[in-house]
Image: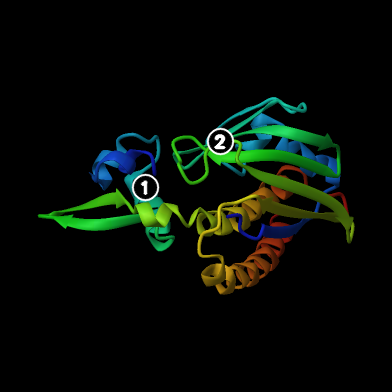
Amino acid sequence: MVAEPISASVVIDAEPAEVYEYFTSVEAMVLWMGQFASLDPVPGGKFAVDVNGVAVRGRYLELEPPNRLLFTWGFIGSDVLPPETSTVEVLLRPQDGGTCVEIIHSDLPRAEASKHAPGWRHFLEQLAKTVLVGHGQNAEGQ
Amino acid sequence: MLMLVRDQPRSVNEIAAQFDISQQAVSQHLHVLRDAGLVAVHPDGPRRLYAIRPEGLASVEHFLSELWPESLRRLKIAVESKKPRGR
């Protein structure tokens, strides 16, 4: 059984090409996700990131700089979501002089999807608030 | 961290010893995992032991629905703090 895709998005004050690097460069990746990364950004290349002790493993499938990436995603040692068993699509679209980053995570095992739908809406609302606050602080900080 | 508590329950001290981050940070991570229903806490005398919740692992979806918004928030901060836009 496969659940509905999970999606998340954020608008970043930078051009798509700049944001794209954060999905393909080890140095940039560990600045926002995970503590260790090993990345080979070519079709079929390795996508490995350790996030808080969870070993994420997958492969890059499609790379269309600077607007789109597709890679597989799973966890070492997980029976529920083993390496390379789900798919993450990243869309980078110009918006308001910046970039709208959208993550669409699909092919996930069904796990109480209906129960978590209200929680998901809550997280998006929280995200919107956080981004607004973060943006204000960032603008002042620069 | 989930791998550590997968095979046997462990205390915060035991878990923190495996990471290059403070025990306070480890506690915060455990709190997130517990809120996500991925780990359970069992009192063992003065200690609190953390163990994986097998039924919680089934809700990987929930784990990811927290991971992505938080990760994107960090991505935004990382990109925007690295290169101030010339405005």
Task: Report the quarter where the C terminus of chain B lies.
Answer: bottom right
Q: Find residue B30 and report its horizontal and vertical position in percent.
A: 37, 53
Q: Position of residue A112 (x, y in %)?
A: 51, 65
The secondary element bearing badge 2 is classed as loop
Q: Residue at x 71, y 62 (%)?
A: A135
Q: Position of residue B32 (x, y in %)?
A: 42, 57
Query: Is residue A81 positioned above or below B55 on the image?
Result: above
Quadrant of residue A102 within the rendered picture? bottom right
Comparing A9 with B81, the one in front is A9
Q: Position of residue A141 (x, y in %)?
A: 69, 56
Q: Amino acid at mark 2?
A: Pro
Residue matched to label 1: B26
Q: Residue furthest front?
A: A1
Q: Residue furthest left?
A: B45
Quickly name the residue at label 2: A83
Mark 2, Cα crowd under 10 Å, few <14 / some 14-19 / many 20+, is: many
Q: Chain of mark 2?
A: A
Residue at 54 percent across and 68 percent down: it is A116
Disc 1 versus disc 2: nearer the observer: 2
Circle 1: element type: helix
